Amino acid sequence: NDKKDIEVLDSPCWGSPQECDLLHFLSKHDHSKLVLHNDHNYLVVSKPPDLRMDGHHPSTVLKWLSYQYPTPFLLEKCSSKNNEIQKKMLLLQEVSKLEKHSHLPDNVLRPCHQLDYATYFGSVVVGQIQTSRRGCWGFFCLTHNKKGLLGIGARPCHVG
């Protein structure tokens, strides 16, 4: 019984390596369908597959949410442009530079937990105010909570 090693490539793309930046992500995902819940305390989003939480990668949850919910700091940086298209493009450029939540001085959105990059789909709870972030973060850190992933599929998954 011969076993072949399968090389798994880490490619956070929705098409090709040339089309994995935030602009391509935004063009291929309907923001309104990814937001599961939004109130004063929490934002719950469905994390698409192959989207990292943050870091130097072309598309991340941090960049996506910072674009969809720009802070006053970001809006001020983009206010010099006269038309909306130029403002959106400048916002896209500014957000694309972000690697950590702390890179924005007034960023109030903070994930309350992490999801693995390779998780096909999963919900991410994002705190919108400090007290809700602390409460939710504490809940996820409690040792008596059981966390896990449940995979439900209607058809077989093929690798390759």
Image (tube, rainbow, N blue to C red):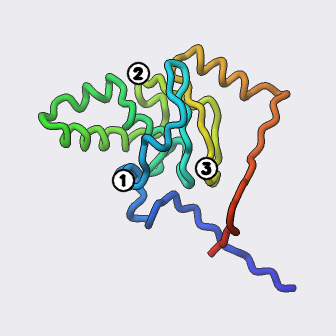
- The residue closer to the viewer here, 9 or 27, is 27
| SS category of the residue bearing label 3 | loop
- Residue that carries the numbered disc 2 in the rendered image: 106
Disc 3 to disc 1, how far (Cα)?
18 Å
Q: Is residue 50 above or below residue 78?
A: below
Q: Is residue 151 above or below residue 115?
A: below
Q: Is residue 66 left or right of residue 90?
A: right
The residue most toward the bottom is 1
Q: Residues within 10 Å of mark 1 (few under 14, many from 20)?
A: few
Q: Is residue 135 left or right of residue 90?
A: right
Find residue 27 and name its label: 1
Q: Amino acid at mark 1?
A: Ser
Q: Amino acid at mark 2?
A: Asp
Disc 1 to disc 2, how far (Cα)?
27 Å
Q: Amino acid at mark 3?
A: Phe
- Residue that carries the numbered disc 3 in the rendered image: 121
Q: Position of residue 50 (x, y in %)?
A: 55, 55
Q: Residues within 10 Å of mark 3 (few under 14, many from 20)?
A: some
